[in-house]
Image: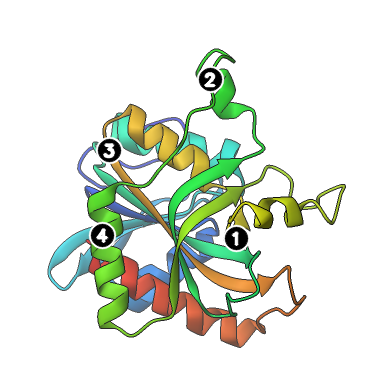
Amino acid sequence: MSIHIGAKEGDIAETVLFPGDPLRAKFVAESFLENAVCYNEVRGMLGYTGTYHGRRVSVQGSGMGQPSLAIYTTELLRDYGVQQIIRIGSCGAMQKEISLHDLIIAMSASTDSNMNRRRFGGEIDFAPCADFSLLERCVAAARERNLGFRVGNVFSTDAFYQPDPEEWKLHAQYGILAVEMETALLYTIAAGFDARALTVLTVSDSLVTGHALASADRERSFADMATLALSLA
């Protein structure tokens, strides 16, 4: 048992799916996993372990933002022997050719957070990137399923409500595909533990058009993303 995860040794699988919302962790467990058992209810951040096509897999809520995700990522890798984490979440598209429902597979992540810079003594800008083996397999699986997807850089922000609503246009100018709130630190912490990490995101809204998915469409797209991530387990 760690400070924020109430699981015992052996309760958590080597592969963990990592939605921000704990209720989405519950949704994945109840919808896709067989014999799922809840191993964590501390602070309401639900975690479950079950099997998917005979393979043992866990799903754990991370909370919103990099500070919250950093707690759960560190404890999963340090205290429970997790080997790979696959974040599944939503994002806002920054490029006009990206449509609602599309998947973004994050090859790398830029950030406005100071957490990475503090980790490296304020001297360097570490470039967080995905595990290539997971990335390669995810792209192949998305193609097999004929899913619309893009691969590239995402922007992990600490501020959901930006003081400058036009700031995203500068990021888009440099080819960033979408904005979310967690991936940069996930990739950094995983690298420090010599573990594998990948983020797969569903485009839920577009900063370019202002359009957004309705709640029913959002759940359907999330299910497609969850099954894609589970295939990597």
State the image coordinates of residue 153 (x, y, percent, origin top left). Answer: 51, 53
Q: Earlier in the sequence, mark 3 or mark 1?
A: 1
Circle number at residue 136: 4
Circle number at residue 195: 3
Q: Is residue 4 left or right of residue 157?
A: left
Q: Which residue is mark 1?
A: 178
Q: Residue at x 59, y 55 (%)?
A: 176
The amino acid pointed to by label 3 is Ala
**Decide: marks 4, 3 in contact (CB < 8 A)?**
no
The amino acid pointed to by label 4 is Glu
The amino acid pointed to by label 2 is Ile
Q: Earlier in the sequence, mark 1 or mark 4?
A: 4
- Secondary structure state at the residue bearing disc 1: strand
Q: Residue at x 38, y 71 (%)?
A: 226
Please name which of the two marks, 2 or 3, marks the residue nearer to the observer. Answer: 2
- Image-quadrant location for residue 7: top left
- The quadrant of the rendering that contains the N terminus is top left
Circle number at residue 124: 2
Give how far apart the Cα atoms at labels 2 and 3 are. Answer: 22 Å
